[in-house]
Image (cartoon, helix red, strand yellow):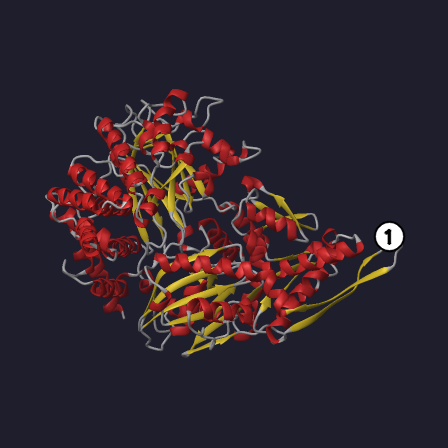
Amino acid sequence: MGAVAAQATTEIRALAQILDELDYYNVLEITPDASASEVRAAYHRATRRFHPDGHRQIGDDMRPVLGRIAKRVAEAYSVLRDPRRRQVYDQQIRGDSARVRMPLVQAEAEAERQSRDARLGKTPNGRRYFVLAQADVARGDKVAAERNLRTALTFEPDNGVFKDLLGQLRGKR
Amino acid sequence: MATAIGIDLGTSNSCVAIARRGRVEVLENSYGEPISASVVHFGDDGTSLVGNQAKACAVQDPENTISAAKRLMGRYFFSEEVKKAKAVCSYKIVEGPNHSVRVKVREQALAVPEISALVLREMKEIADARLGQPVCQAVITVPAYFNDNQRQATRDAGRIAGLEVLRLLNEPTAAALAYGFGKGLAQRVAVYDLGGGTFDISILEIGSDVFEVLSTCGDTYLGGEDFDDRVIDLLAEEFQAQHQINLRKDRYALEKLKVAAESAKKALSADDETRIQIEGVAKTPEGAALSLERTLTRVEFAALVSDLIQRTFKVCDEALQQANLTVRDLDGVILVGGPTRLPLVREAVEQYFQREPKTDVDPDQVVAMGAAIHAAALVGEEQESRLLDVTPLSLRIGVAGGLAETIIERNTPVPIEQTSVFTTFKDFQQSVRIRVYQGESRRAEENELLGEFEFSGFKNARRGEVRIEVTFEIDTDGIVKVTARDPDTAQAASTQIHLSSGLSEEEIRGLIDKHHAPAAPSAAPGLETSGATLAAVASVAANPPALAGAPADPFDALNACAGEIEFDAEQLEAAANIPLEGPADSAFELDPAPLEIGAAAAPSGGGAGDAGEIELDGAGADDALDVLDEADLDSLAALSDDEAASAAEDPAPEATTQRRAAPAGGLFGSPDSDLSIFGDEDDEI
């Protein structure tokens, strides 16, 4: 018991020391291509080791240290379990900044913005022609709609929403 | 060896259990009953009686018989819930210090946790008697949807009862643990927990030794007692129509109605109809005794309460949506709480979840059993299961214009911590005031105020030069802590705050002494505080003059007075979910550009808006144009369903126009300010 506890304490101390350098994948000990179920399993694994409930006998000096790790584990999971937030986070850590944490609210807001962008278009012109195309659809003018969508796609060739609508129009004709 | 019990502190009934030697056992009271009424009767000789015997006193002595105290736990006196309780309670509810609630019994004003403490102590004594040794450690359960104030009050009650509260455990999580413990399951379940006074729904993933809550939602004022109230209303109305006598005005008659309504409800679990008969419920002006007699059928009862049952499913919809699941993704439904015995409720649940609910565990005892299992695990008596819970409510901070911005969203796993950086709003500002809320509304006043505190002692500098890091933390009990520190000063003045719970540390200690309960050793780790912390708590306690100075609606005063926090454009984007189109990388600032807090009081007579000045940086003008652009696009794009939904959430173009015009009316201090933070038109007060 004593030896196990001492080993756990050493592990916690060591992890706490480098915690601020670890990205969320490191914290959960998974690779960036981990699947959703691997993320969940990793979270469960980490909580088995670091949840405060499992360390009630830990010394008072170690309690805040353990708490810091437990909270970071939950934070990592909060971001990585949500595909939208995870995408935003991946962009952040792939960027040149060395930031390994992301405020949850910011992750959410950015994810929201990106999904809006995907719907409405990322570029002013893509958006403009997409909106025109939608108005055409509402009026029932499929020819004009198709023309505007094709124009929108020249600005944003990868926009799935634009492509889907175009596909629908072609299907209907 | 340490013995730790699990207590389900319910609105109507409480239950205590213990797990030992691999078995979970519900401990019966001295009358052989597994559950005891959460009722306290205060006798004229200064003694108190708890449980089913106390409940029996309600008819003779309604003023001194306190039931359903849980509905008042952690509530402000001015809250809707307390107003509702006042309308149906036979005992006196009065206002205490800091807008707290007191119950007046025999010339004494008792704090609500004090009453719950008497129930908890009864549970402890049942355990002491059954186990033949004193018990001082317990896991106490709370509705998952309880906010921080309610949790703090419950913790306080435990301490006053002389218990070391090992953990506050959410009731549905406890139920899931009792259901799945040691079975090696791999299931996704919904726990439908309709209690006497509260409704919770939790969606959990149960693994071999991990219970992960995926989402939780609830209503802390919806339960079996509301079903009874509907029957009481029916009986009282019919009686009034017949005899022109309002039975609700007569405390004794009301208690008789309550008893009759509850037993009728229970009878309808088994029978298709039941006979209600109350002899001598009232007297005619001439003095002749009147009786109430009526047959209530199951169909009539269903009509009375069906909207209440439907309300639970609205909450279920929300929980499923938060977990990104549909009923088809679930492997089972667990029923918890006495009212789930009603065939009416069972049928509705079965219909909603498209499967027969599991009834193999007693809905009245399953929560206490789960609490006992976890208590044993925490003291090392039982194999450990990890309970991974979430915070039921979003944690917010008050900002300019009477708004509250999210810091930690609901259904985020706990423990969790988030830090935001703020700065001062005026040159050489001495202090900042921070208000913390829980709830789902962007309007501050529609959320629960957890507390406010002032932070000072940072360096004396020009506006914007001070950095104040505010850390928001939610622990495994769901209890909130807020810490402010100045990272620049050598002293790193650190202040930890336990937000208002109605009772100060001093009051709690006083109550522990009063009730002669031996103070439990290290009663609550979370509440053990250093001298500095105690000072901070004291300053919070001293602070509520801001609250106290508001006679009608404290929130008006709160909004009108200081404590405005300023966001800059980037922060606004993150916080207000309004996509401003800036340079591509600008949205990725990890270290949020400084928020500003102004602590100076608003000019007297000024509305909330006067104090709320928001400054945008140089990019403001461009961003402003973009907002308008987006809004216009929304209105055009609202042709498809998807877009219609999105448009509903986003500022409508007219609103944008109005907001742009608003500065002329002097509603907002800075011409740019209205663009960003005031996302919805109705945010403008």
Give the residue pinned by disc 1.
Answer: B285
Indicate the position of residue B468 as horizontal and vertical percent values: 30, 35
Q: Residues within 10 Å of mark 1 (few under 14, many from 20)?
A: few
Say above or below: B554 vs A98: above
Tell me if B621 is positioned left or right of B517 in this view: left
Three-letter amino acid code of the residue under disc 1: Pro
> Where in the figure is residue B57, as x and y percent of width and height?
71, 62
Check disc 1 and report its element: helix, strand or loop. Answer: loop
Residue B366, given in percent of the width and then of the height, sits at: 48, 71
Give the chain letter at badge 1: B
Q: Can you say whether A160 is above or below B562 in the image?
A: below
Q: Describe residue B320's horizontal placement relative to residue B628 as left or right.
A: right
Split into 4 quadrants, where in the image is the C terminus of chain B?
Answer: top left
Of the pair B51 and A169, the residue shown nearer to us: A169
Residue B435, image x, y percentages: 41, 38
With respect to residue B611, does B316 lie above or below?
Answer: below
Residue positioned 48% across, 64% down in the render: B193
Q: Is residue B278 visible?
A: yes
Could you tell me which residue is drawn at 73 percent across and 58 percent down? B238
Indicate the quadrant containing the N terminus of chain B: top left, top right, bottom left or bottom right: bottom left
Q: How many marks?
A: 1
Of the pair B646 and B612, the residue shown nearer to us: B646
Residue at image position (27%, 38%) is: B633
Q: Can residue B373 be seen from the camera position used here? A: no
